[in-house]
Image (spheres, rainbow, N blue to C red):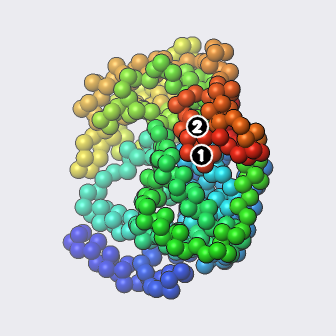
Amino acid sequence: MKRFAAFSFILILLAVACAINPVTGRRELALVSEQGEIAMGKETDAEIAREYGYYGDPELAKYVTSIGLALAPHPHRPNLTYHFAVLDTPVVNAFAAPGGYIYVTRGILALMSSESELATVLGHELGHVSARHSVRQMSKMILVQVGLIVGSALSDTFAKIAGVAGIGVQLLFLKFSRDDEREADALGVQYARAGQFNSGEMVAFFSALQRYGDMAGGHSLPGFLSTHPLTSERIQNVKALLSESDVAFPIQRDTYLNRINNIVYGDDPRQGFIESGTFYHPAMRFVFNIPQGWEVQNTPAKVTMAEKNGNAAIVLQAEQSNDDLSAYARTRASKIEGGQIVNEQSDRINGLAAYHETYNIVQQDQDTLRARLSFIRKNGYIYTLTQLSKAIDFNRFDPTFRNIIGSFNELNDSRYLNRQPQHLRVLKADGQRSLKDYLNQSNVKKEIWTHLAIMNELKDAEAVPGRNQLIKIVR
């Protein structure tokens, strides 16, 4: 009966939940209204800010917004209020959240070389919003989840206590279809043209991206090629859309490069880094051990460590609080569905007050989980280290868990506290020296020479930039 009810509900949704696509004019599945889409966009924006953080350069943010707003009158949904932001991550990516929220990363800004290139990327993302591609993806997810409610009844407790992002951020990890990407490319060209930007720079961006590859690395945010798969066919399609008038508009290369001068390049060690099996966080002044072979993802919101097969994990989060540790623990425990307390105890870890609570978490039709939440007070913050595994495996992983918890300590070593990030510097070439000469002079590591050649639209590091040409190096 439950399966029949769910199936009937899906049929009803399919029958009534259709809307007109603003771009094509065709009716299509849309289980989320425009008002719902905008509300979800606001919620997703808050999630993204908390999880990944905005880049701390207000002038650069204003510049990106100014390019976005120059395009904003031209999409097929001019009634939306569009928002543009720069995320503080080296991952090369740009994406749109529901309701008109557009993001670029500092990594993608470092890769691009002109104002028109930025405009075509923002136009592409505006195309996804106009055609409601994310809403279509969301509608499919809702249908899947309706079916899963009956089929598995999997508890979401594990996701809640691990701090897994909500449905809004999950959408950012979904790949669009080839048709969606082609449509967004065409709309990006159209919107850039209407804003009087050089649409040919979309080809320049795609070509650089193909050479650069998907530079997501070990970060939790996927790279552009992960969420926007690129093919040579797409590049040819964009070329076919261009006209002589499109490429006659100025690209504003120097203006753009001067705007991104001094942007942080690569990982920012002030936000945490790993060295010789130890995680250091200079800004918040803490340190702890990393188990050998475990995967680590670090965002402003949390540090997640997972055993290579995914059978155990530790999530570290911090919150400003003056609450008593036991009272704070009770508040956190109240959010755990099905939690059955196993034990609790007060403790001191390297001189810091600590409190531990262990729970079994019973899940319907699933293995029982065990979670130990260790709360440590340091400098006005309570750090929560949540240790997770199946209950039957917990004792096997417990020595590793205890080693991590026991290694948490105040960071006082100036060798790690004073680590500074690298920055992109813009120089004027003399027309005689190669890019390699400039990189050698600045002691740039050879492993990123190829990347910098691509970022400078040069064949390789041996190439000689033209006289007075602005080039990017790293210092």
Q: Would residue 244 be visible to someone looking at this image?
A: yes
Q: Residue furthest front?
A: 432
Q: Position of residue 250 (x, y in %)?
A: 73, 64
Residue at left offset 28%, top offset 78%: 8
Extreme residue in the left direction: 1
Q: Which residue is mark 1?
A: 458
Where is residue 398? Give x, y as percent. Answer: 33, 23
Which of the pair 391/228 is nearer the observer?
Answer: 228
Labelled pair 2, 1 in contact (Cβ < 8 Å): yes
Number of numbered markers:
2
- On the image, numbered disc 2 is attached to which residue? 461
The spot of residue 271 in percent (x, y) is 61, 32
Q: Residues within 10 Å of mark 1 (few under 14, many from 20)?
A: some
Please tell me which residue is depicted at 25% across the width and 47% down the height of the picture: 366
Q: Considering only vertical position in the picture, is 379 above or below 165?
A: above
Q: Is 162 displayed left or right of 10 in the figure?
A: right
Tell me which amino acid carries mark 1: Leu
User: What's the mark number on residue 352?
Assistant: none
x 38%, y 22%: residue: 292
* Residue occupying image coordinates x 65% and y 40%: 464
Give amino acid for label 2.
Ala
- SS for callout 1: loop
**Marks 2 and 1, how far apart at CA:** 7 Å
Q: Is residue 26 left or right of residue 2?
A: right
* Secondary structure of residue under mark 2: loop
Quarter in which the C terminus is drawn: top right
Which quadrant of the figure has residue 435? top right
The quadrant of the picture occupied by the N terminus is bottom left
